[in-house]
Image (tube, rainbow, N blue to C red):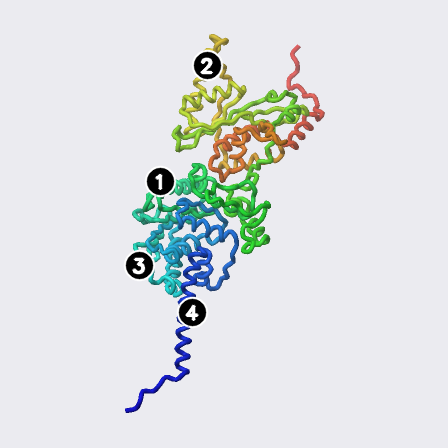
Amino acid sequence: MNAPESKLPFDDAVGAQTLKAMKDELRLRQSRKLQSRAGGLIEFVRYFWSVLEPETKLVEGWLLYDICMHLEAVTLGKITRLLINVPPGSMKSLMVNCFWPAWEWGAMSMPHLRYVSFSYSSGLTERDNTKFRKLVMSDRFRELWGEKFTLEKEGEIKITNDKTGSKFASSVKGIGTGERGDRVVIDDPHDVHKSESDVVRTDTVRWFRETITDRLNNLDDSAIVIIMQRVHQGDISGFILEQGWPYCHLMVPMEFEAGREPFNPLGWTDPRTEDGDLAWPERFSPEAVANIEREKGSWAYAGQYQQRPSPRGGGIIKREHWRAYTPEECGKFGVPWPKFPVMSYTVLSLDTAQTEKKQNDPSAAIVLGVCKDIWENRRLILMWAWSDRLELYELVRKIEETCKKFKVDRVLIEDKASGHPVAQELRRRGRVISDKIGQNPKTADRADFGVQLITPEGDKVARMYSVQNLFECGLIYAPAEDSGSGDYLFKEWADSVIGECADLPKGQHDDLADAMSQALVHLRLLGLANMPDEDELDRVEENKYKRAAVPLYPAMS
């Protein structure tokens, strides 16, 4: 019997090297686990970036780090409501629908979490589910956390694991009304191409307001994460901000604008200090941003990139085109402050609501007067404005009181269903009061204004464009007061009108703006709101020598 063959020294060396390699691999794997947890979400993104984007280099920047930081705060339970407004191209879908859920399931040992994702199109959330599945099934992920969970269902619509975790993809008003999640993710709920539709946009906001909390597993601990670009002041972000809901708000315009710090309980502030500084210069160069703004136009750029759904300073009507009626300006009209000059013609323009119910728009009115300065230049002054939800009787009484106070000559009401009863009641009461005046003029209220139903031509945007040049020429004034710092601020009620005009057509409310354009179109048709060159032509025409008219018939003797 032959003796067993002994191992060669070379074999021992190979075995030792293999063992060492295995130990090194285990140490590296453990290090990566610790790094992904301790290093946070950004370290996870760095390591797994090539799994989802093998041909694209990861370009980092402070904006990416801050998105990661806010998502980590949700994971750690510091916040349960997060609203993120960032420009397109900020990796928002990859972050909230792919990397972050995978990081929570793996590195954070939370495979029990359930996600419900919504977008304006189910195709987008299903696309992200496919990427998420690719990530958690990758060799890189499985070698680190393969023991944490096993996938049981791997469809595009729903992915589940054996630890009760799941990820469901749906759309706004889509299927899955019974699905609930520990994380409800809303990624771009508004279709940019349909954002101008009041019906579609309002329907989307109603869906969010009435159904989204029903999708939470636990009202106290489950989280809602919204990440989107702004498309309109009345979008979901605008609704949340207007209602004052306590969402942690990460708002990052592409170009920095001072004075726009959002509510953020994490203490986050925009790290930029100079107006115009870019959010992600490593990814978007100044030249690229300039091209985007030029190609998209000011409206789209303001909403999608600046998170401000109207261009800075205003869109059709810019804020700086309004002239401030101040004590200094009073002298140019020959009256003491704070008096208005004598008006040659005054209108109250009304935009009526459908009903007095709170869910509908309010009725809104502006009072606009026509006057001349000491140089005989015609000017228009906004004298008063209000917006309120009133029943018919209360609305008519408020109109009458306003007309009496400002000596209104004519009330303008849009010729629509809700305007007819207002006009009828004003006319009826006007006749009754006029009769009383004849009987007892000392005690009767005067109602000597006319009521006119206006049939508008074109939509509200077209009407505002038709009077844009009146603002650009500086013909329109609004009362302002000293701010105490050397400049003037428009009165609060006047600023409401100015703001709505500046935000049209992206504003949440447009009732005052509609009333303003209605009044200006009326004055324009009457020849009372002329451009400076038109007034000059009128003066030249008036001063021309005119031959005496030849009588058609001989004078009777």
State whether residue 216 is above or below residue 427. Answer: below
Q: Quadrant of residue 362?
A: top left
Label 3 to label 4, Cα distance in Å? 34 Å
Between 32 and 127, the residue placed more toward the observer is 32
* Element type where label 1 sits in the image: helix
Q: Earlier along the polypeptide chain: callout 2 or callout 3?
A: 3
Looking at the rendering, in which quadrant would you find the C terminus? top right
Crowding near pointer 4: few (<14 within 10 Å), some, many (20+)?
few
Between 105 and 289, the residue placed more toward the observer is 105
According to the picture, the residue beneath numbered tag 1 turns out to be: 210
**What is the three-letter code of the residue carrying label 4?**
Asp
Crowding near pointer 3: few (<14 within 10 Å), some, many (20+)?
few
According to the picture, the residue beneath numbered tag 2 turns out to be: 433
Label 2 to label 4, Cα distance in Å? 98 Å
Q: Position of residue 168 (x, y in %)?
A: 34, 53
According to the picture, the residue beneath numbered tag 4 turns out to be: 24
Q: Position of residue 488 (x, y in %)?
A: 60, 30
Q: Position of residue 245 (x, y in %)?
A: 42, 39
